[in-house]
Image: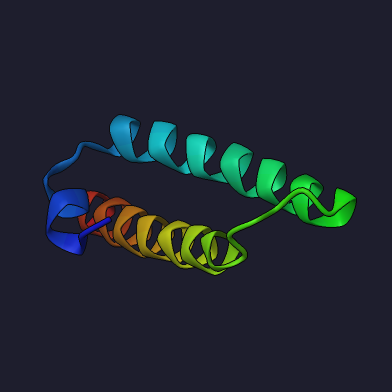
Amino acid sequence: METSELKEQSVEELQATLLNLTKERFSLRMQRSTGQLTQPHLLRQAKRDIARVKTVLIAKLKAGAQ
């Protein structure tokens, strides 16, 4: 997920994206705990995508408040 793509999204879209990524990360964690996760790099990727979304979301919220 590119940061430039995230910057073009609205706050509502970012919140929806964040929710989807959080659900995906939970699913991946459950797969890892049961030994079904065949691509462990997806966990790290999901975690970093969540951080990117949160960073852009907070920046947009701060810019809107000023």
Q: In the drawing, does residue 27 fall left or right of residue 61?
A: right
Task: Check the picture and name the quadrant holding the C terminus.
Answer: bottom left
- Please say if 46 is above or below 23: below
Colour scheme employed for the rendering of this structure: rainbow
Task: Check the picture and name the quadrant holding the N terminus.
Answer: bottom left
Task: Give the image quarter of residue 23.
Answer: top right
Q: Nearer the viewer, residue 29 or 47?
A: 29
Residue 40 image offset from top left, x and y in percent: 62, 65
Residue 22 image offset from top left, x and y in percent: 59, 44
Q: Nearer the viewer, residue 61 or 50?
A: 50
- The structure residue drawn at horizontal position 18% and vertical position 40%, both measured from the top left corner, is 9
Counting the numbered discs, the total is: 0
Q: In the drawing, does residue 65 fall left or right of residue 5?
A: right
- Please say if 11 is above or below 29: above
- The structure residue drawn at horizontal position 46% and vertical position 67%, both measured from the top left corner, is 48
Residue 31 image offset from top left, x and y in percent: 76, 47
Task: Give the image quarter of residue 13.
Answer: top left
- Please say if 21 is above or below 37: above
Residue 55 image offset from top left, x and y in percent: 37, 65
